[in-house]
């Protein structure tokens, strides 16, 4: 792979590039991430990059190809969102689609961010910083950025939520094993879909603790844009409240770092629009179902032999936790009518 990377970077820079370090980074259960250190000659100019590269299979049917994720990252960078700067053009590296981006320093491990005393100041600052970043994402003119034709988006007359639920049904069917709790939850979601009122924006699709970099007490970058789509911005707002992304700090419902109301008010200030709390509660249930189905699909990547991985196999077991949480939240709202 090193030869492929050196060849590609040399072609893109028009100079001789020597890779001094190439190693896969920890995490990245959906796509690979590789640290790339290189020297460009003449002049010994340094390139400090991250290469994002396909794994085998996909987490959901909505997973973007790397070339489209690259385009979304470029639009976010141009729109002032804190993201790594994308470099060059999408490539094929050792037979798999990939792209390169700026390497940004920071911590992304969720359990550290929500519990380590070293990040106490960051936790205090993050609700406002995350809200500002998310509002900036939702303000991006996706049409002017050329994303409308690239990204999944609702058909005429179709709500973004209905489109999401239809995809979840198809993904659950593809797992080809019984999950009656998820079937029940999906039926409840279809029957109780709230009125469409949040508008249509660019949606990050996986905006949460674990997909952001924190350096010191500041938000350094928003990562992992492979689920970006055109849809309902409240999906992003609610996703941060899904229990899995609290990393054990369940008392703070917004990502394990803040009270739910603190987060919602921060987003309202940043975006200039009000958020319907009942709608967010509904979308939190949908988020638990979404991640339960996603965890099953991750395990299927391993079980099918497409991407053998103990990490992917272990993710299958956590689906039960989201099933329980979805049913608990439905019961708290009066049951399955």
Image (cartoon, grey):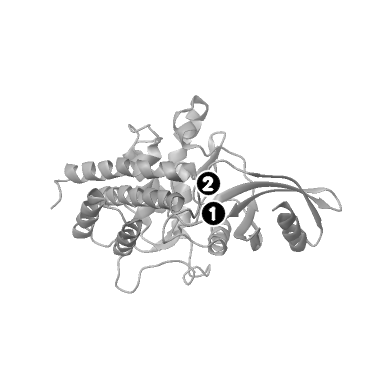
Percent of width and height locating residue 82: 55, 49
Q: Is residue 57 above or below residue 120?
A: below
Percent of width and height locating residue 301: 45, 53
- To which residue does mark 2 refer? 28
Q: Residue at x 46, y 39 (%)?
A: 126
Q: Is residue 213 above or below residue 231?
A: above
- Which labelled disc corresponds to residue 96? none
Percent of width and height locating residue 41: 84, 53
Task: State the separation of the CA atoms marked 1 and 2.
Answer: 9 Å
Query: Which of these two is toward me, 203 or 286?
Result: 286
How many discs mark residues in the rendered view? 2
- Image quadrant where residue 23 sits: top right
Q: Would you call the spot at circle 2 few (<14 residues within 10 Å), some (14-19), or many (20 or more)?
A: some
N-term-proximal mark, 1 vs 2: 2
- What is the secondary structure assignment of the residue under circle 2? loop
Query: Which of these two is toward me, 137 or 24?
Result: 24
Q: Residue at x 52, y 39 (%)?
A: 108
Q: Is residue 248 above or below residue 64?
A: above
Q: Would you call the spot at circle 1 few (<14 residues within 10 Å), some (14-19), or many (20 or more)?
A: some
Q: Residue at x 50, y 52 (%)?
A: 307
- To which residue does mark 1 refer? 55
Q: Is residue 101 left or right of residue 169?
A: right
- Residue closest to the far bottom: 156
Percent of width and height locating residue 176: 32, 57
Query: Which of these two is toward me, 44 or 313?
Result: 313
Badge 1 vs badge 2, beta-carbon distance below 8 Å: yes
- What is the secondary structure assignment of the residue under circle 1? loop
Q: Is residue 278 above or below residue 203?
A: above
- Residue closest to the far right: 42
Is residue 218 visible in the rendered image? The answer is yes
Kindly report which numbered mark, 1 or 2, lies closer to the viewer in this rendering: 1
């Amino acid at each position: 792979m090193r030869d492929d990377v050196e060849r590609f970077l040399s072609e893109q820079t028009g100079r001789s590039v020597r890779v001094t370090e190439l190693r896969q980074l920890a995490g990245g259960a959906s796509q690979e991430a590789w640290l790339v250190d290189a020297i460009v000659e003449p002049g010994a100019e340094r390139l400090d990059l991250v290469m994002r590269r396909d794994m085998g299979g996909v987490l959901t049917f909505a997973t973007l190809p790397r070339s489209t994720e690259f385009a979304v990252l470029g639009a976010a960078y141009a729109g002032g969102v804190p993201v790594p700067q994308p470099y060059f053009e999408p490539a094929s590296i050792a037979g798999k689609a990939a792209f390169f981006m700026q390497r940004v320093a920071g911590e992304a491990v969720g359990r550290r961010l929500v519990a380590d005393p070293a990040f106490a100041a960051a936790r205090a600052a993050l609700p406002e910083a995350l809200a500002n970043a998310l509002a900036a994402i939702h303000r991006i003119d996706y049409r002017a950025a050329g994303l409308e034709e690239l990204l999944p988006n609702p058909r005429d007359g179709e709500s973004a939520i209905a489109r999401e639920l239809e995809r979840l049904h198809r993904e659950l069917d593809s797992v080809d094993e019984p999950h009656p709790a998820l079937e029940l939850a999906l039926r409840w979601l279809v029957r109780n879909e709230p009125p469409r009122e949040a508008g249509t924006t660019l949606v990050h699709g996986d905006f949460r603790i674990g997909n952001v970099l924190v350096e010191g007490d500041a938000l350094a970058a928003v990562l992992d844009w492979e689920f970006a789509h055109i849809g309902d911005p409240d999906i992003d707002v609610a996703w941060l409240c899904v229990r899995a992304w609290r990393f054990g700090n369940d008392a703070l419902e917004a990502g394990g770092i803040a009270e739910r109301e603190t987060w919602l008010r921060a987003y309202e200030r940043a975006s200039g629009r009000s958020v319907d709390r009942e709608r967010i509660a509904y979308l939190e249930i949908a988020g638990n179902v979404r991640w339960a189905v996603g965890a099953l699909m991750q395990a299927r990547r391993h079980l099918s032999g497409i991407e053998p991985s103990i990490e992917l196999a272990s993710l299958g077991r956590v689906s039960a936790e989201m099933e329980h949480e979805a049913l608990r939240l439905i019961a708290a709202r009066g049951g399955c009518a």
